[in-house]
Amino acid sequence: MKTHISLNVSNIEESIEFYKKMLAAEPFKVRSDYAKFDIADPPLNLTMNQVKFEKGGSLSHLGLQVESTEDVLSIGERWTNNGLLTLDEMPTDCCYAFQDKIWVSDPDGNSWEVFTVLGNTEGKENPPSACCTPSNEPAGISGASKSLCC
């Protein structure tokens, strides 16, 4: 089984460059208005269609769940080394789970997280912090939000 995600993008060339860095892979197919990444790990079929649009839809964010904090840090380091701006949330308590995560945003403002779940916080006396709710945009990270967890 493989997840398929199709994104509308405003500039196919910018998006290809971003996703090459984020996924550490070359696109499988490229056309003037289309690109496809076919990734084995994680199993992902990501396509992009260049179209004109005024704003995004109701998508909150996208994520890659990994096994450990070490995996989160490794991917975050690769993103940083590839010139992507990141935002660390380590550790964070949101969406009824204690997590370590790092965020990055694509050229059209789609937020991606790489994260690991460290434990369940549901039923604890202290409610979790605000979840999946955009807050102030960190300096220098266009389109990213400080707290977009889940």
Image (cartoon, rainbow, N blue to C red):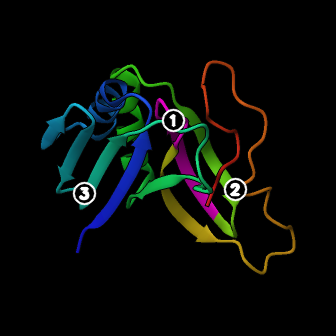
Q: Looking at this view, is 13 or 141 the one in front?
A: 13
Rendering coords of residue 65 (x, y %): 42, 60
Question: Would you say residue 136 sits in the magenta stretch?
Answer: no
Mark closest to the chain's N terminus, 3 or 2: 3
Residue on which the image places disc 3: 45
Q: Secondary structure at mark 3?
A: strand
Asked if labels 2 and 3 touch by Cβ distance under 8 angstroms, the answer is no
Work out which quarter of the rendered image holds the C terminus and state it: bottom right
In the rendered view, does 123 fall on the left or right side of 146? right
In the rendered view, does 46 fall on the left or right side of 39? right
Q: Secondary structure at mark 2?
A: loop
Query: Hey, which residue is sitting farthest bottom in the picture?
Result: 123
Work out which quarter of the rendered image holds the N terminus and state it: bottom left
Residue kind at label 1, given as amino acid type: Ser
Please report the residue visible at 59 percent of the width from the left and 52 percent of the height from the top.
57
Residue on which the image places disc 1: 105
Q: Secondary structure at mark 1?
A: strand
Mark closest to the chain's N terminus, 1 or 3: 3
Residue on which the image places disc 2: 132
Residue 26 in view (yes/no):
no
Q: Which residues are magenta?
A: 98-110
Please report the residue visible at 62 percent of the width from the left and 18 percent of the height from the top.
140
Residue kind at label 3, given as amino acid type: Asn
How many marks do you count on the picture? 3
Q: Is residue 140 above or below residue 107?
A: above
Rendering coords of residue 47 (x, y %): 29, 49
Q: Looking at this view, is 37 or 48 the one in front?
A: 48
Q: Is residue 115 above or below residue 56?
A: below
Say which of marks 1 and 3 sits in front: 3
Task: Tell me the distance, in whole angstroms, between the alpha carbons under discs 1 and 3.
Answer: 19 Å
